[in-house]
Amino acid sequence: MTVLVAYNESPQGEAAMRAAVTEAVRRRQELAVLVLTPQVGAAVPAALAHLLDTVPGTVSVAPIVFRSEQADVADAIVDQAEAIAADLVVIGSRKHSTVGKFLVGSTTQRVLLDSPAPVLVVKAGYA
């Protein structure tokens, strides 16, 4: 039983991390972190390390997983949710214009439609 958070170093990523920790505590589940920014090494980004330091001791944290450069963001999130049999996927989102959604597509929408688990979408202002 796991809560998966898709994290990137942004206000949305930080909000998603906070929400995922809250859900992991509430559900008494493990927290899994998928870093969306591909990494050259296995070093945890400093901002994420700081957030992980605030995770209560009652929550176990799975080894951090990094998205590969070749993987599409939405596919990486859905694939990781399937791989760990996540009970909840938490993602951050920012507002896009209608034209922006049409031209670029919406990662959030794809995750919502394709995720094997319920998805919690969090805006940057989540406290």
Image (cartoon, rainbow, N blue to C red):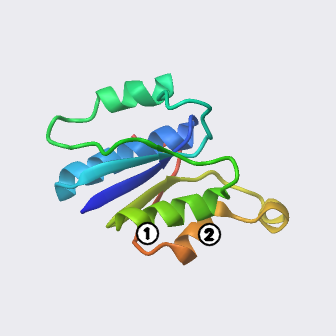
**Residue pointed to by mark 2:** 109
Q: Name the spot of residue 62 as percent of width and height, x first.
A: 31, 45
What amino acid is found at the position of numbered circle 1 in the picture? Glu
SS under mark 1: helix
Residue at point 20% right, 43% down? 59
Q: Amino acid at mark 2?
A: Gln
Image point (62%, 48%), residue name: 68
On the image, the x and y values in percent for residue 60 come to 22, 43
Task: Name above or below for residue 104 compared with residue 57.
Answer: below
Quadrant occupied by the N terminus: bottom left
Disc 1 target residue: 82
Q: Which mark is residue 26?
A: none
Q: Is residue 30 above or below residue 45?
A: below
Q: Earlier in the sequence, mark 2 or mark 1?
A: 1
Spot the residue most to the front.
Answer: 41
> Which part of the image, by quadrant, shows the C terminus?
top left
Q: Residue at x 72, y 56 (%)?
A: 96
Q: Nearer the viewer, mark 2 or mark 1?
A: 1
Q: Quadrant of residue 85?
A: bottom left
In-image side of 82 versus 28 (left or right):
right
Alpha carbon of mark 2 to alpha carbon of mark 1: how far? 17 Å
Mark 2, Cα crowd under 10 Å, few <14 / some 14-19 / many 20+, is few
User: Residue 43: image x %, image y %?
Assistant: 49, 27
